[in-house]
Image: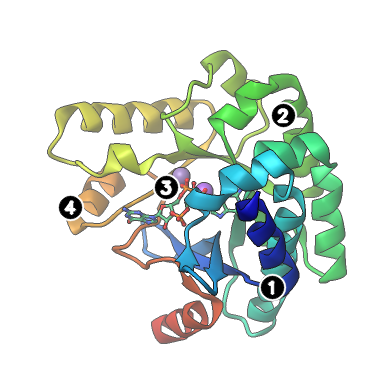
Amino acid sequence: LTQERSLRRALEEGEFEVWYQPKLELADGRLCGAEALLRWRDPARGLVSPAEFIPLAERTGLIVPIGELVLDQVCRQARQWADRGLLAGRIAVNVAALQIERSDYAATLRQALEKHGLPATALEVEVTESLIMESPNHARQVLCDIQTLGVTTAVDDFGTGYSSLAYLKVLPINHLKIDRAFVADLPHNANDVAIARAIIALGHSLGFHITAEGIETQEQLEFLRGAGCDQGQGYLFGRPMPAADFTAWMQQRR
Ligand code: G
Ligand code: G
Ligand code: NA
Ligand code: MN
């Protein structure tokens, strides 16, 4: 209960921040977007990872207003970066299951885009396999509404959940993100090499673009590029960082 109260306070007091991690095109190293990653600056505990508070936010329903706050901050930031000609690509936001169950998420997206005068090409939505499999028909409808707006869709942490290929082929999905668990031991672990190659081949044949997460070494990058992986993110390129730092990071690259 006290934890729930501090989460409510965090929302009221503006203790949530959105950090950004760059996404690159592997073929030419071009910046192609960013992932928005939530952080809680708790006065008592310091910076808290979403892994620690998202589960509680989902159980209490607070994830819905928190998600709206993330979307609003991301759209405001995207507007600024677009106006300064800094970021042409999409910013991906993570969406929790309860957000698509409890609210009309596509309508929320549309309103946020309108409020900030942004085109739909400014955003991408990331969902997990478990979100999809909890209620595949509803997920399909929501993803379809999102794509109709012009916002693209990605399946996060691909390969760690239990999504069925039967659903995958009928879902409106643009990107698969290879979970960083499969990237960590590339290219030395033969099983991970096989898994990464299989995801890339399967994904491409179903018409998806493939993004690899957690790229930390040049070797991993070279393997993934050679295997035909389209995009990547990871500490090798840039860690998640506050908006001001990401602005500086983009300016330095130009
Ligand atoms: O950034 P970090 O590695 O600490 O993220 C931990 C987890 O929190 C990841 O699974 C990520 O998808 C999730 N996450 C980060 N930001 C958000 C957010 O805004 N909403 C939701 N639902 N999950 C998020
Ligand atoms: O579940 P999701 O893929 O949204 O979570 C992304 C998480 O991965 C974030 O917490 C982010 O901080 C973390 N992350 C991003 N890049 C790297 C990386 O290169 N190595 C590791 N270990 N973690 C990363
Ligand atoms: Na994600
Ligand atoms: Mn992931």
Vertical position of residue 207 compared to residue 218: above or below: above
Q: Residue furthest left?
A: 188
Q: Please tell me whether residue 109 is drawn above or below residue 131 in the rendered image.
A: below
The residue that disc 1 covers is 14
Of the numbered discs 1 and 4, the one sitting upstream in the chain is: 1
| Disc 3 element | loop
Q: Residues within 10 Å of mark 4 (few under 14, many from 20)?
A: few
Q: Position of residue 39 (x, y in %)?
A: 54, 64
In whole angstroms, how far apart are the C-alphas of marks 4 and 3?
Answer: 16 Å
Q: Residue at x 77, y 34 (%)?
A: 101
- Secondary structure beneath dot 1 equals loop
**What amino acid type is highlighted by mark number 3?**
Asp
Question: What amino acid type is highlighted by mark number 2?
Answer: Ala
| Residue at left offset 67%, top offset 76% | 82
Quadrant (top left, top right, bottom left, bottom right) of the C terminus = bottom left
Alpha carbon distance from label 2 to label 4: 36 Å
Q: Residue furthest top?
A: 166
Q: Position of residue 124 (x, y in %)?
A: 64, 52
For label 2, the crowd category at 10 Å Cα-Cα, with few meaning under 14, some 14 to 19 and many 20 or more, is: many
* Disc on the earlier residue, 3 or 1: 1
Separation of disc 1 and disc 4 at Cα? 41 Å
Q: Which residue is mark 3?
A: 230
**The one of 111 and 11 positioned closer to us in this rendering:** 11
Badge 1 or badge 2: first in the primary sequence: 1
Identity, as a three-letter code, of the amino acid under mark 1: Gly
- Residue assigned mark 2: 139
Q: Look at the numbered disc 1 and say if its residue's Cβ is closer than 8 Å to ligand 1.
A: no
Spatial separation of the CA atoms under disc 3 and disc 2 = 25 Å
Say what secondary structure mark 4 lies in. Answer: helix
Which residue was labeled with disc 4? 219
| Percent coordinates x, y for residue 207 in the rendering | 55, 32
